[in-house]
Image (cartoon, rainbow, N blue to C red):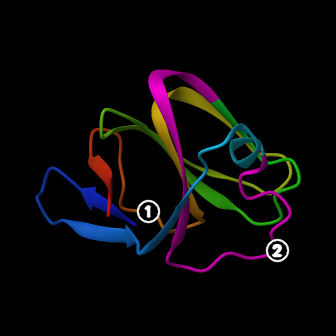
Amino acid sequence: MQLVHEPASGNRTTVASTVDTADSFLAKARGLMFRRSIPDDYAIAFRFDDARVRDVHMVFVFVALDVVWVVDDVVTRVETLKPWRGFGRDEADLIVELPAGAATDVEPGDGVRLQE
């Protein structure tokens, strides 16, 4: 699975070529905790049945992450969170966590989607 970025300019790019999904409650709770590093082209996606305010914390996360909140394939927020003490909150039906710097070109209002 890949994460595809579709900005208003139309220059479609692949942000992450390897995307794992956190589908179970335990996988969503664990996320990227305890990992010492993650590959540059990697992301983890958290899919939800509905859009509502969702939190992301960085407790036990050892690397900085770019976090993207998405509602109906449209980015609502992008933030770089610091290891251990970062925290973010926004509405989403999809949250994607990537290595810090991977989502530099992704902005609110852009399209992003998971592609098989």
**Mark 1 and mark 2 in contact (Cβ < 8 Å)?**
no
Q: How far across and how far down the image is residue 93, in percent?
A: 45, 31
Q: Residue at x 25, y 70 (%)?
A: 13
Q: Secondary structure at mark 1?
A: loop
Q: Residue at x 45, y 61 (%)?
A: 103
Mark 2: amino acid: Arg
> Residue 42: which quarter of the image?
bottom right
Check residue 43 for magenta coloring.
Answer: yes
For the residue pair 9 and 27, the one nearer the viewer reads as 27
Q: Which residue is mark 1?
A: 104
Where 51 falls versus 109 (above or below)? above
Q: Which residue is mark 2?
A: 36
Q: How far across and how far down the image is residue 15, in percent?
A: 38, 68
> Residue 51: which quarter of the image?
top left
In this rendering, would 67 be left or right of 35?
A: left
Q: Residues within 10 Å of mark 2 (few under 14, many from 20)?
A: few
For the residue pair 77 and 33, the one nearer the viewer reads as 33
Mark 2 and mark 1: span between their CA atoms? 22 Å
Q: Residue at x 71, y 52 (%)?
A: 31
